[in-house]
Amino acid sequence: LSTGKRRLSMIGRLLLLAMTGVVHASGADSCATDRSCAGARSCPCLSDLTTFGIEAGDPFPATIGGERYVYPSGYGTGCETHDDGLEPYCGDSVEPHPNWCTKPWCYVDISNCDKRTSQGVYNSDLHYSYATCGSTNTFDCWREGTCDRPLTDLITQVNSYLLSNVNELEKAESMLTATGGSDCVDSTTYLTSCDCSCCSQQQGWDNQRITFDYTTTTPFGDRPDQPPPKLDPCLSSAVATSFSHVALLEVDDTTRVGYQYYGSSLGTYQQWPGTQWCPETYDPRFRDWYAGGIAGPKDLVLVLDTSMSMASGGRMEMAIDAGVKVIDTLTSVDYATVIAFSTDARPLGGRSTLLKATKYNKERMQIFIRGLRASGGTNFIGAFAAVWAALGSQGSGCNAVVLFMSDGEPTTAPSLVQIEAQAAARGAHVLTYGLGLGSRADREPRGGGRVLRDIACAANGIYYPVAEDDNLGDVMASYYLLLAPLTEPGQMRLTFYEDVFTEKELRTASPLVVPRTIPDHLGPSRTIS
């Protein structure tokens, strides 16, 4: 999400593995879905909410994403499709509607209910249940092999959940930004993962302490003890509302690992199930699912200068750390390779060939990068010859990007005419990074920075001067933002990734939420309509 020149890109994530639980209300104990139904005998619906401060006949107040809504009297009492037709998720102006909009549910007394429940998102004293009203998991028939529906229906269903999150986050962020957050009147759903008092160990989740009742917010890694940016507590209510409905309807087997979450371009991360977790280094913006959701499938060539001048000032160590971080952003649908160069070019494995970014190949690339040492000259011509050879091999067939990092004057520089022609022939963007060659405050690049700038301009890219006290890794690993304007907003990306908590391989579906600008600190502002 973006407003003006500040970008708050959010990546919603809904893991298919979380969708295989069963939510059944069976036989005589199940509840018919007519409007007079009072719920299952073992989990009756509340008939009024007076004890919770809502008198009979009064409208039901709700605040989502900082915006107030007034729902009809009787909301949540008796088994009905209470959300059908209501904003912000299920109104006539919203397409597509998430599946839970048309599912009956009601508020219940958790001390008198044997069904799966969740804490209310508008009133934390209330609890609600779909199961007592007979609502079942959307994905049961696929899990049980009894479906006569095509697999594409499953993808469509997941996509509808994701797009409903996208729509509400965009709307909430726009409203809150316009008011400076002054309309943020409800942060009752905000819970920091650094102090999740209601989290506990759960079967199937290793040693992770979690809660199925809340969505937690993890502030950015360099400031885990500080609150997140002002808008995030407000946006957490929008996220938590949708996450809670989806989780309660679709997940019953809570021993299976699966998540719903999103990350913002400010580095904040929100997740269901909530978790006790306060990392010092985690940054969602450099996770593969985040970069993949923004940029989509891509071909990437990482080129690192290993000439003798890189031995000074810790530059080689900075380049190695940055290269490893770039490789971490790759997803299973990407193709990539690494080329080191000094007097000669040295591609990974001795061949200028793109490799599918599997876990094994990413580890190969990172081992290669960690083994680099500084020596020799600075042969740009040899490096670019290897680049064009790599981009001529089989890849994703999608966007191509070259990340070219150097710290000095080339001993041999390529022709800009040839650079422009080769990049155009391969549809490639060349991003160049001048390490120790000045900063963005300089009116003109210094030394070799001029050559790097001219190469980027010839190849539809951006030149980044990086001072030695800057974070080269963050700058280089943010390359994917250049590709964001080329990506269709809201398009769902399916990829495999390794869960940071359990180290299990999971499949994720990730859409980009309305990319419009690139932050100033990462490059010139770029806008799409």
Image (cartoon, grey):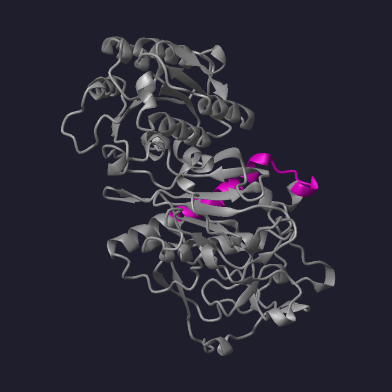
Q: Quadrant of residue 451?
A: top left
Most extreme residue toward the left is 443
Residue at 55%, 34% in the rendered image: 331
Residue at 39%, 20% in the rendered image: 427
Place of residue 183 in the rendered image (x, y in percent of width and height, measured from the top left): 34, 70
* Res. 89 in view: no
Count of marks placed on residues: 0
Place of residue 344 in the rendered image (x, y in percent of width and height, measured from the top left): 43, 10
Q: In which quarter of the image is residue 493?
A: top right
Prevailing SS of the magenta stretch: helix
Residue 278's place in the image compared with 447, above or below, is below
Residue 60's place in the image compared with 180, above or below, is below
Q: Nearer the viewer, residue 408 or 108?
A: 408
Residue at 63%, 67% in the rendered image: 199
The magenta-colored residue range is 143-167
Check residue 159 for magenta coloring: yes
Q: Viewed as shown, does residue 298 lie left or right of 466?
A: right
Place of residue 390 in the rendered image (x, y in percent of width and height, measured from the top left): 48, 15
* Res. 112 in view: yes
Q: Viewed as shown, does residue 204 lie left or right of 154?
A: right
Looking at the rendering, in which quadrant would you find the C terminus?
top left
Residue 241's place in the image compared with 153, above or below, is below
Residue at 52%, 36% in the rendered image: 328
Most extreme residue toward the right is 27
